[in-house]
Amino acid sequence: MRYMLLLYDNDDTRDAFFGPGSEPLGEEMDALLKELRDSGELVATDPLADPAQTRTVRVSGGAPVVTDGPLAEAKEHFGGYLIVDCESIERAVEIAARWPSARFAPLEVRPIMDVGGLEM
């Protein structure tokens, strides 16, 4: 079963992973990614650009309305994802708990639905 691990960021986590002294966390993340690649569980992963680069699109009166920034003002924002293919949600949760940013911000683990929606 495939699961998406949604990574949430805030200013502190961005600094921890991309600022000065971030090498140990980066090495820990790289080691976990290598383990997941080697086991065949990693399907895809990417970080997302800073929320300042985000555009939110809503349709109002049949016309698109585009605003700058993420969907809602919050301390945390969606910062990246991993898609893993593993045997159970428990394994996906185990991977999420080992992801270094879990110490600073939440991760969400969600099953990816089959096109037929049979998981509902």
Image (cartoon, helix red, strand yellow):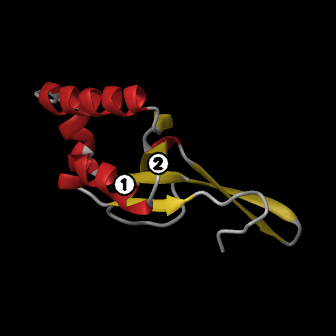
Residue lying at 18% horizontally and 39% vertically, measured from the top left: 16
Element class at badge 1: helix
Asked whether 84 or 65 is in front, the reply is 84
- Residue 2 in percent (x, y) is at 55, 51
The residue beneath circle 2 is: 86
- Residue 1 in percent (x, y) is at 56, 53
As drawn, the residue found furthest toward the right would be: 62
Residue lying at 45% horizontally and 47% vertically, measured from the top left: 51
Element class at badge 2: loop
Tell me whether the residue at label 1 lies in contact with that at label 2, contact meaning CB atoms closer than 8 angstroms: yes
Disc 2 residue type (three-letter): Cys
> How far apart are the two marked residues, 1 and 2, measured between alpha carbons?
7 Å
Disc 1 residue type (three-letter): Arg
Mark with earlier residue (1, 2)? 2
Residue lying at 32% horizontally and 49% vertically, measured from the top left: 95
Q: Count of labels shown? A: 2
Image vertical order of residue 83 relative to residue 62, above or below: above
Asked whether 102 or 115 is in front, the reply is 115
Image vertical order of residue 34 relative to residue 69, above or below: above
The residue beneath circle 1 is: 91
